[in-house]
Image (spheres, rainbow, N blue to C red):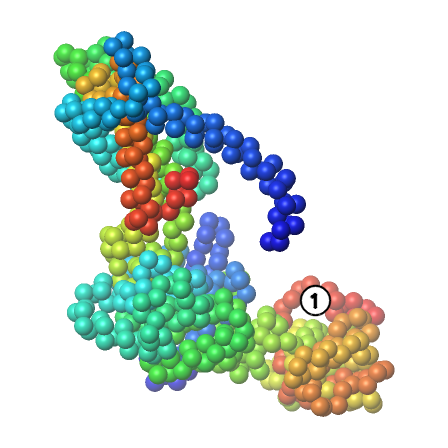
Amino acid sequence: MSSLKKAIVEIKNVNKLYGSNQVVKDLNLTVYEGEFLTLLGSSGCGKTTTLRMIGGFEELSSGSILIENENIEDKEPYERNVNTVFQSYALFPHMTVYENVAYGLKIKKVRKNEIADKVQSMLDLVQLGGFEKRYPAQLSGGQKQRVAIARALINQPKVLLLDEPLGALDLKLRKQMQLELKRLQKKLNITFIYVTHDQEEALSMSDRIAVMHEGVLEQLDTPINIYEKPKTKFVATFIGETNLFEGYINKVEGKQVSIVIESGNIRGAGEDYHENELIAVSVRPERMKYSLEPVEGFTLKAVVKEQVYVGSVLKTILVLANGKEIKIERLAGETLPPEGIVYLYWENDDAKLIHSDDNTFFQAVENIQMG
Amino acid sequence: MTKRNFKSNIIPATTMVGPVTLWLAFFVAIPLLYVLVMSFCSTDEYYNVVFKFTFANYQRLFDANYVQIYGQSILIAFLTTSICIILAYPFSFLIARTASKKKTILYMMVIIPFWTNSLIRIYGWRTFLGTNGWLNTILQTLHLTKAPLDLLYNQGTTVLGMVYCLFPFMVLPLYTVIEKLDQNLLEASSDLGAKSTTTFIKVILPLTASGIFSGSIMVFIPTLGLFFVSDILGGGNTDVIGNLIERQFQSGNNWPLGSALSIILIVITLLLVRLYQKCGGNMENLGV
């Protein structure tokens, strides 16, 4: 991130424990003004807890959170200049759409006609003009979602926190709302911190993604880098599909790295790797190649097990000699691997090398060497 | 439904609805009708019931003494209901927000007395509050008072007994609505800038109003009829409508007048329930 950007939320060495269960582990994260940052991870990874700590609904066990350079530890939620869109929408059922959206302004004791103007323009912004007098029970899921967003935005927060806001919507509506949210965020230039477990959603909307796993921030990067250059095995397997090989380096020649895995030899490219180092190699299914002849540096023999049609792409599942399954993806219309034995390979640059210190794997490597 | 379907459904329908209908007919409809008919009957000079139509019983209901007792009943019921709300609201919140194990204990603290005979419990209060009762003995032993305090037989004691008897009826509907209250709504309110008092007034109170409402109905109406509480604790100085009715059937031996009074109590009840319904109250909360 360029140093020109102004930090708006700084999370410093934050830990959160429930009893002896540590849900957030030494989290450090800086969010910049105007950015769309996504906290991504499976359920129980600490992403929602992190969001709730920023909002003021959970206390930190240790560490600090700064909003605009100000420590907000002792501030109640109503004193923080952030607003939240809750997963369940949390619309007040006894209030109309208008009253729900006006709530924040009424609390601030804004003048009545000013409230009316602001609510009107906010409802227009989320395309809900004409729904003022309806009650939440009379709205569809998507409409409720829009009201929740309008209600949270009306106080013009510095940061908007969104906790899986699209989780309850069907696929088509979700896609549409993703685009609208992104459009809204650009237009209003408000910082969004967005929590989701949907990696596709994260990839398509975010400026940066923070991938969390078991309370630990695994990687914080742009969507492209998260996908193309995963730093950990978890990120490689969690984001998109991948083929992961584990082994050790037996030769380094310049940038080219030769690796021994259980099923044979493979190659990759990278700097700062040395011989005998344990390594994991991630190759995306769309980057996998096959040949009917052996390819230099690769000794991966596989046979086609099945082909799966998933709309625009065709997935081929192959099996290595040791039973490990390999996925290859091709766009519809491209040629597919034939029946029988094929030799798998890839361009050196298409393999992403990940430092590995997995000791259980070390045992396997020894077994290979023992023959 | 076609005709044939209807016919073939008669037997199962009768077996299912029949017993309930019989039950309601014998134990609700016929007794009520009996009371209604009785309220228009006359008595001879020995107070024997004579089946001669008259409005006299209803005319007697406007007797100044009776009207004064209606007013007193309503005052006692109003006080009882108000005190029940004030006590039960925080208590219900406490139950709803307590973790599971302690919650059961708190809940049982309300339910177990509820299962015990209330007459016995009210006698318990008399023993406790009497001139030589526990409370006075303790106070005197501790030299906090010189002479025994006159705690029984006033309006306050009657209200105390009523609150004690009817408290669970306020807690149960309140607990139901408070339990259902979505924690996220309170967080959303705070998130939008509301302090806890504002959240209470603007979110919690409106969303639990239906519980207060049904609880009030379930406390107010029985208070008008709980004659034994005012008999035992009020010593006859704090009659409610229930006492008037009881007296006509017992010592007064004027069943037609007692029936007319009962009809009045039923009418008041129905009017209150209608009011509750009109204000958007949920009939299910009353167990109807």
Viewer-side residue, A164 vs B178: B178
Query: Splitting the image into 4 quarters, where does residue B89 fall?
Result: top left
Q: Position of residue B104 (x, y in %)?
A: 45, 36
Residue B169 shown left or right of residue A108 in the figure: right
| Left or right of B115 in this view: B193 | left
Which three-letter amino acid code belongs to the residue tagged 1?
A: Phe
Residue that label 1 marks:
A361
Q: Is residue A76 above or below residue B35?
A: below
Report whether B33 appears left or right of A348: left
Between B133 and A270, the one lying in front of the other is B133
Residue at x-position 43% and y-position 30%: B28
Answer whether residue B187 is visible to the viewer in this image. Answer: no
The residue at 52%/68% (across/down) is A197
Vertical placement of A193 versus B106: above or below? below
Q: Residue at x 83, y 90 (%)?
A: A293
Secondary element type, mark 1: helix
Closest to the observer, A262 or B258: B258
Q: Which of the 4 image quadrants contains residue A139?
A: bottom left
Residue B9, position as x, y percentages in the image: 63, 45
Q: Position of residue A68 (x, y in %)?
A: 29, 72
Picture quarter with the N terminus of chain A: bottom left
Q: Nearer the viewer, residue B187 or B150?
A: B150
Question: In this view of the protein, can residue A168 be seen by the observer?
Answer: yes
Q: Residue furthest front?
A: B52
Q: Decide: is A370 above or below B94.
A: below
Identity of the residue furthest to the right in this view: A340
Res. A279 image quadrant: bottom right
Q: Residues within 10 Å of mark 1 (few under 14, many from 20)?
A: some
Callout 1: residue from which chain? A
Q: Residue at x 83, y 70 (%)?
A: A371
